Image (cartoon, rainbow, N blue to C red):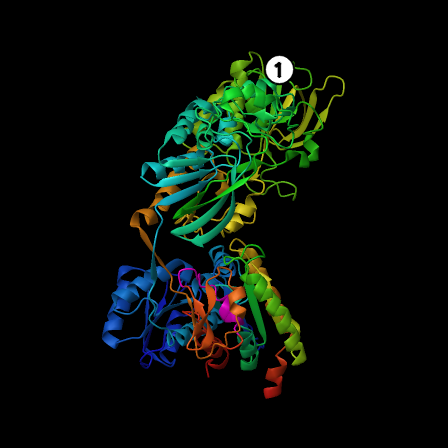
Amino acid sequence: MAEGEWQPKILAIICNWCSYAGADLAGSARIQYPPDVRAIRVMCTGRVDPLFIMKAFADGADGVLVSGCHFGDCHYIAGNYKCAKRMFLMKSVLKDLGIEDNRLRMTFVSASEGAKWAKVIEDVVKTVKDLGPSPLNQLQQ
Amino acid sequence: MAEEKKQPRIGVFVCHCGTNIAGSLDVKAVQDYARTLPGVIVADEYQYMCSTPGQKKIDDAIKEHDLTGIVVAACSPRLHEPTFRTATKEGGLNPFRFEMANIREQNSWVHMHDYEGATAKAKDAVRIAVAKAALLEDLYPKSVPVEHAAMVVGAGVGGIQAALDLASAGIKTYLIEKTPTIGGRMSQLDKTFPTLDCSQCILTPKMVDVGRHPNIELHTYTEVEAVEGYIGNFDITLRKKARGVMTPTEATAKGIVGGGCNGCGDCDAVCPVIKPNPFEFGMKPRKAIYIYHPQVVPLIYTIDFDSCVKCGLCVEACGEKKAIDLNMEDSFETVKVGTVILATGYDAFPIEKKREWGYKQFDNVITSLEFERLICASGPTGGHLIRPSDGATPKKVAFVLCAGSRDNTGVGKPYCSRFCCMYSLKHAHQITEKIPGCQAYIFYMDIRSFGKMYEEFYYRIQDEGTKFIRGRVANILEDAKTKNLHVYAEDTLLGQPVDMVVDMVVLAAAVEPTQGVDTVRKMFGVSCSQDGWMLEAHPKLNPCGTTTAGVFLAGVCQGPKDIPDTVAQAEGAASAASIPIHMGKVELEPYFAQCIEEKCAGCGMCVNLCPYSALDLIEKDGRTVMHVTEAKCKGCGTCGGFCPGGAIYMQHFTTPQIVAQIDAFLLGGEQ
């Protein structure tokens, strides 16, 4: 962590069966990635209420990542499809609110994709760092 | 749901995990920070929280401080959540009043060179976990009965072994096989390494046992059509493909006493349609009404309706037995089982994709499985190895190992297929033994003879005169006139290019998951690795289990393995699958949805979203509200994610709990 560098606040909501397991695998394999993301575990991305996303941005998140199983591989058949549909909606809502829609990202990482998880985190952190603080945070200041 | 509200009293325990955690972040700082968090009464640390003294700390703290919630910051909840739940329970708390902060897999191990970043992340993780722990409630797992029956999908040697073990343990077992006979790949092999047992000789007794076992219900030419339910209570629909031929039992059921197929083969003799036999890789013909080979179990003929011309000659030939029904259609049957073992095996990688080796371009380039049939006494040539181009006996045969395995070009497979080295050694032995004067050459990268008595077998083959050339074969070209083959490689031990002319080339093709197996895998909710092999729950500690409770794996469907390993895993899977059945009941995690009836508007959106039909609308006190059938609910929370009125209460993942976690992360940082 470089001194004085702006640290984005990024929330990840990830499913127990694929992405959480993939993130664990990245750990077992000691694949290094930036420490900027904080994860909350749910059983399925289907659980991700739009409220959670709005709450996160309202609370000052600079980015939100939702990550689940690949299509067709959902532990609960199709929770990830249902979540993905909602993400499109959320992105348009965010846009309307003046928040860049790529602050919200949905990815699909399976339990065997530790390396992909590390890549996703790198990408998300880079995207958010490039965007800078969330407009809502700038407003508060 | 919410009863008496007691102020949260939380205990936090930070694990060092030796240096796994403590080496990459400041455990002491995390512990000190935890003490400052609202609701935290005690914060402790220990070298190994999962050890007996570590767990005792939890137990003691609960009693001493009258705690209402426990947070352990350690490894992944996917690893040790059950351990610490038990410890929480031993201390007298409900086990679901435990929350884990993952500061190892998702922190210390992935931020090994960022001490401050990792420490800050660990503090946040603990804060988030404490916020959830403050809102945790007592939950009670639901106990459900387990059907005293099991299913094994795939009847190769792995599936056969698993089914026999389950059946011998007194469990009714359905053995499902998509082809007309059981036996799988092993029945196509001639000899088995390193003992050189005849493959059929050691397999057929087991096949016969399957046919005879009173607890095994065998369904060949059958596929899994649909899966419903959960551990203990799977409802599995089978598609029994139209075979066109009735078994004696089926015939008797239809009132044809003494009828049904007895395998006499009279129909085969008269059938005018000739097709290649897939069991022999097309090197031998079969009729439209056929059996794969003489040892099939069950010994029942099958009509290939794609090529049958319905001339009716077979019906005439069958006569009084009246076994043949040319108008038979697929039928469906639903069975209820407690646990399932998947043993769906493998296919050979289509090695013609590696154009440089000339398979399907040059007659005398064959695959190892074709070699097995050609050298096998029951094969198309009666065990005489001949060149496909001219029927001559080969004098020089080259074996190409890692054909498509350990291949990072993107065409082949990156993994080692594990048994090709050993069977190629066996092949070299077989030609040396069967054809005097025939020379075997093995082109290899490394000889991986890892098993019991395998290395000794390798020495034996060396002593018998097989020549080993270390180098991957670059190219194979055919001499158009003689049909001999030029094998180009680099001998990496001598550092010289090789241009060897041989009569025949055998490619040890890589293996890949059985074609179409993804459909089955997804029906059972089993994940797969990047290569498509089914994913075990844990590679070391739960190699037979999957992430779907009650579904287990055996054999190559989980990854390449030889016969001893397949059988060993099958026995392991059978043992694991029999435990819930013998226990008679299982406990389901109580992550059920609940309806907050006063908030429910009865819109019914959730009802359509539920993948398990666990939700219904009911009339209650003059209003329409949602109702959850707990036994069907698997706790995904999709209904809760959608409910526009916030009327769904997802136990253990409630909206207040998750929002508290989000708030704790974003609003509750260090001042």
- Element at badge 1? loop
Farthest-out residue, top? B436
- Chain of residue at mark 1: B
Rendering coords of residue B400 (x, y %):
60, 29
Rendering coords of residue B395 (x, y %):
62, 15
Q: Does the magenta-highlighted stretch encompass residue B636?
A: yes
Image quarter hosting the N terminus of chain B: bottom left
Farthest-out residue, front? B255
Q: Amino acid at mark 1?
A: Lys
Is the residue B513 above or below the residue B104 in the image? above
User: Which is nearer the eye, B316 or B398?
Assistant: B316
Q: Does the magenta-highlighted stretch encompass residue B299?
A: no
User: Which is nearer the eye, B665 or A105?
Assistant: A105
Q: Tell me if B312 is positioned left or right of B611 in this view.
A: right
- The image quadrant that residue B291 belongs to is top right
Residue drawn at x 31%, y 50% is B584
Rendering coords of residue B512 (x, y %):
57, 40
Is the residue B211 above or below the residue B88 in the image? above
Q: Main secondary structure of the magenta part?
A: loop
Which span is picked out in magenta?
Answer: B630-643
Residue drawn at x 40%, y 52% is B233
Find disc 1 in the rendering and name its residue.
Answer: B395
Residue drawn at x 50%, y 32% is B184
Is the residue B162 above or below the residue B24 in the image? above
Rendering coords of residue B47 (x, y %):
33, 63
User: Which is nearer the eye, A105 or A49?
Assistant: A49
